[in-house]
Amino acid sequence: MKRTLQVLNELERDGVFTRYAIGGAMGATFYTEPLLTFDLDVFVVGSPNCSGAVSAPSYNESAVTDRRYKDALRGRGYLKEEGECVLIEGVPVQFLPAYNPLVEEALREAQEIMYEDVPARVLRSEHLVAICLQTGRNKDRERVRILREQAKLDQNFLADVLRRHQLEDKWKLWTE
Amino acid sequence: MDGVSAEVTRIFAAKEQRRQDLARLPFPEKVRAVMQLQEMAATILRARGKAVQPWGIAGHDEKVGAASPP
């Protein structure tokens, strides 16, 4: 995992993408008890240096963007893929280009962490909740429950995120 | 809790406390715990015909012709 994060930092430094942050189950695990997952969801904002790409990719660009990350990793010798993931130092990494305004905001406001001596970024717990609400699968509902129980959610910040992204009704439906 | 003995209630409370304690672990320790969970789950999932691979297994990712990092 440490080496995987180092590679992500190298990709960011080399301009393959401009910013990344860990989300999904591993992002949630930063705030909660360990949650079983077999991949590492990494949200990314694309590089302005790449032709056709802007800092926040349009929502149908994801396949092109995904290919760009995979090409960059191939150049570094990471050739093996598992489904939608690329194996980086033994960890299947799923790159998720920022696909809507909520995810773009979550990436902008992700928190800096240290993993041992390696810097990394994790989405805020409130944004993880909002993304789960928006995604809406059964496992997202379960994740919201665990985050509510174990993460120290900033209720004012969360309320603001839910209001701005029209997720208040879903929150009420899932929590009342 | 209705129909649950005091002893079982105590056990449930202890389990909940354990989960809260786990949530407070440093992130690298939690990642190690996730990898242990993967090992445990992989055995069961493979028996059910689902191919999963725990992280960090030697030779799991073969980095071929690496351009830069060690």
Image (cartoon, rainbow, N blue to C red):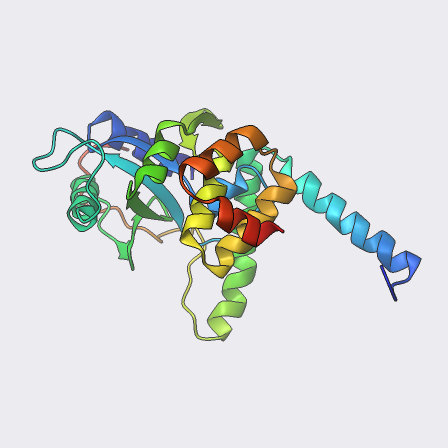
* Quadrant containing the N terminus of chain A in the rendered view: top left
Q: A141 above or below B44?
A: above
Q: Residue A42's quadrant in the figure?
A: top left
Q: Nearer the viewer, residue A148 or B32?
A: A148
Quadrant of residue A48 in the image?
A: top left
> Residue A35, can we see it?
no
Image label count? 0
Depth check, front residue: A14 or A76: A14
Q: Residue at x 59, y 41 (%)?
A: A32
Q: Residue A163: image x %, image y %?
A: 46, 37
The answer to whether A128 is drawn above or below residue B37 in the figure is above
In the image, residue A39 lies at what x, y percent? 40, 51
Residue placed farthest to the bottom in the image? B48
**Residue B19 percent across, percent down from the top left:** 69, 46
Please provide percent x and percent y for residue A91.
38, 47
Q: Is residue A35 above or below residue B41?
A: above
Q: Residue furthest right?
A: B6
Left or right of A42 in this view: A132: right
A62 sits left or right of A174 in the view:
left
Return the residue nearer the eye: B26 or A62: A62
User: Residue A92, can we see it?
Assistant: yes
The residue drawn where x is 30% and y is 45% is A96
Q: Residue at x 12, y 29 (%)?
A: A49
Residue visible at 35% across and 52% down?
B59
Left or right, A111 with respect to B33, comes to left
